[in-house]
Image: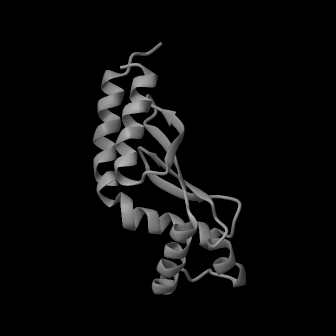
């Protein structure tokens, strides 16, 4: 498989779970992928509700957290062979984490389980150029 084919197939796979997503980084040989998830105003309100309902796990929140949640337009979640990393944004760390947890919990639970096997398949069938 060529990189363009892998990228298109992977994006199609991810968009089954979250339509407004993009691949911001893909390194098939290393098994790395970073996905960008964009938020509408409705999604930001859902993130805020998720944050409020689960505030006990966000112990580092500040006065800016709620405001930042309502301003976040996108977050990035990176998956690699060591696990997943998230929260990359220009906003409050806790706001970014709340948004990432929301996306993972609400939309990506099944995708996260399937992604390692998809990445392994791509790695095995990648045409090194």
x and y, in percent, of residue 99 in the image: 53, 67
x and y, in percent, of residue 63 in the image: 71, 84
- Front residue of 105/83: it is 105
Name the residue located 33 percent from the left edge and 60 percent from the top edge.
109
- Front residue of 32/19: it is 19
Q: In the image, is residue 115 above or below residue 71?
A: above
Q: In the image, is residue 5 above or below residue 57?
A: above
- Front residue of 106/98: it is 106
Q: In the image, is residue 16 above or below residue 28?
A: below
x and y, in percent, of residue 84 in the image: 46, 54
- Front residue of 66/101: it is 66
Name the residue located 40 percent from the left edge and 47 percent from the top edge.
15
Name the residue located 36 percent from the left edge and 28 percent from the top edge.
123
Quarter of the image where one finds residue 58: bottom right
Quarter of the image where one finds residue 86: bottom right
User: Would you say 99 lies left or right of 12 here?
Assistant: right
Quarter of the image where one finds residue 122: top left
Name the residue located 51 percent from the left edge and 85 percent from the top edge.
52
Q: Quadrant of the N terminus?
A: top left
């Amino acid at each position: 498989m060529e990189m363009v084919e892998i990228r298109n197939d992977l994006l199609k796979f991810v968009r089954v779970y979250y339509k407004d997503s993009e691949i911001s980084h893909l390194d098939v040989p290393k098994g790395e992928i970073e996905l960008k998830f964009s938020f509408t105003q409705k999604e930001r309100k859902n993130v805020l509700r998720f944050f409020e309902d689960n505030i006990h796990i966000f112990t580092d929140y500040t006065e800016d957290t709620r405001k930042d949640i309502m301003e976040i337009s996108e977050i990035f979640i990176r998956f690699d062979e060591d696990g997943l990393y998230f929260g990359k944004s220009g906003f409050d760390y806790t706001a970014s984490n709340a948004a990432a947890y929301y996306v993972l919990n609400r939309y990506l639970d099944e995708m996260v389980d399937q992604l390692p096997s998809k990445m392994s398949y791509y790695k095995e069938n990648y045409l090194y150029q």
